[in-house]
Structure formats: structure tokens, C-alpha cells
Image: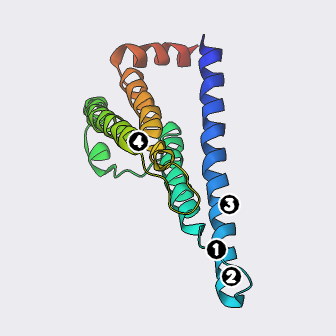
Amino acid sequence: MMKTLTLIDRSLGLILRTIAIACLAILMLILGGNVISRMTGWFSMGWYDEIIELCFAWMIFFGAAELWRENQHFRIDWLYYSLPKAKRRIHTILVSMINIVFLAFLMVEGANLAQKSSALTPIIGFPVALLYACIPISAAIMLTYAIADIFRHSPRYAAEVEVIDDM
């Protein structure tokens, strides 16, 4: 079971990184092409802003989900390290519960936004819901990892990890 979960986790990480990197590469190509287009006047790129919006949103949200998965997202840990070691687990669980509430709200409202969006982009004709779909998907991924953090910092799990580490 753990091997399967580890495989799913690593695969998800690869997918999230690939999406974020691909979006960044597309952004660089399109923005570079737009600079060349404006400088030379050889071709028109009136559609580029629609792709830019999509790639930027997907890069940000899926990149944030990957950072959350790796526990590498930005945080200020001054309070955590100023607490005595005995209180740090409580702090971590409290922060995780606040994150869970926020991410659940983001997931639900992002899903509502994507479902209610029926517009198409003016030039290419992409559904705007495709742009918004990254919000509930990434929030669900981050929510899953935030819930896992609660279990990871529970006293029972911590005791099991200490037993395994002692072996």
C-alpha cells in the first residue's frame, strides 16, 4: 500500500512540475515572439494574451500545488522556532487546520467559478472555464497534502516514526 501511495505521490509531483515548466516555457516563447513581432512588424500576435493568461494561471496554481506537495512553499517560521519543542506539534496542527479551511474554501469557490463560467475567449475561443479549472484542481491537491500533514504530526504517527527510526 505504501509503495502504491509513494508511486502516486511521485507521479503527481512529476505531472505538476511538468505542467509548471511547460507553461513557463510557453510563456517565454510567446512573450519573446511578441517582442519580435512588435519590433519587426512581420506578423501579428493578437491572440497571445489569451494563452498568456491560461499559462500564467496554470503555472502559478500547479506550481503552488507542487511546492505544497514538497513542503517547500514560503512560510515564516519565526513563531514555530520561538516555541518550546513540546508546543511545536500543536502549532503545526493548528496551522494545518487553518490551511485545510482555506483550501476547502478555495476548492469549492474555484469549482463554482469554473462551473459558472460559460464564456469563450474572444479570439481563440477557449472556454474560460479551462482557465479557471486549475483553481479547484490545485486546491484539492493541496488540501489532500494538508490533511496528510495533520496525520503526519499526530502523536500516534510521530511515535510510529520514532519506532521505525530506532530500528
Residue bearing the label numbered 4: 114
What's the residue at 52%, 58% (across, down)? 56
> Is 109 located above or below residue 78 in the figure?
above
Q: Amino acid at mark 1?
A: Met
Q: Position of residue 22 (x, y in %)?
A: 67, 53
| Residue at image coords 48%, 18% | 161
Tags 1 and 2 touching, CB below 8 Å: yes
**Numbered badge on residue 25:** 3
| Pick the front one: 56 or 46 | 46
In space, the residues marked 3 and 1 are separated at their CA atoms by 17 Å
**Closer-to-camera residue (128/14):** 128
Above or below residue 25? Residue 63 is above
List the residue tagged with mark 2: 37
Q: Sequence order check: which comes first, mark 4 or mark 1?
A: 1
Q: Secondary structure at mark 2?
A: helix
Q: Is residue 48 above or below residue 109?
A: below
